[in-house]
Image (cartoon, rainbow, N blue to C red):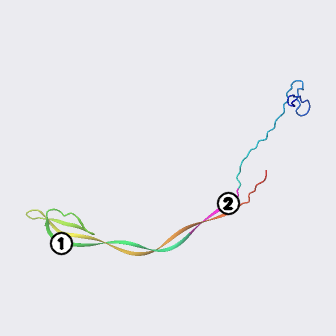
Amino acid sequence: MNPFDEVSPVTDGPFADSAGAESSDLVHIPVIEEQLQVTTRRIETGRITLTKSVHETEQTVTVPLRHEEYTIERTALSQYVDEVPATRQEGETTIYSVVKEVLVVEKRLLLVEEIRVTKQQTHEPETQTVRLRREEITVERTPITPNVRPE
């Protein structure tokens, strides 16, 4: 005979049926279940300190500077022309023509002069003192002993 085949009512103790054994052949037994809940929390274990410092040094440099100078040269021509000559370029020289009207039996252009403007470049080294800056960062770690309590 199987011991689980036969159910006998519990009549006394914490699991006794309050209505009496005669009212029901069923026994209600409460079941307890434990559950686990896992969480995390932040714990400070150390700190970092960043320090920035700027270092300045002076450095002497030679910088080439360019200067432009112009030379003006007038050339008298006194030539008759049929129209005003265009401004023209010959190398670094720009030539501007100057004309005037002269009363003759017929009207003609007399080229009076040319003005030649020549560009010349010179280079001079110039010494200047320049301030240069350089940044530097240092990192310092400060450990902290974790304050963990067993729960």
Local SS, label 2:
strand
First along the sequence among labels 1 and 2: 2
Foreground residue, 67 or 104?
67
Q: Which residues are magenta?
A: 44-54
Local SS, label 1:
strand
Q: Which mark is residue 93?
A: none
Q: Which residue is mark 1?
A: 76
Residue 16 placement (x, y as % from top left): 89, 31
Residue 149 placement (x, y as % from top left): 78, 54
| Residue 53 painted magenta | yes
| Residue 129 painted magenta | no
Left/right of residue 53 with respect to residue 70 in the rendered view: right
Work out whether 19 lies above or below 123. Answer: above
* Among the 4 quarters of the image, the one containing residue 54: bottom right
Q: Which residue is mark 2?
A: 47
Q: What's the amino acid at mark 1?
A: Ala
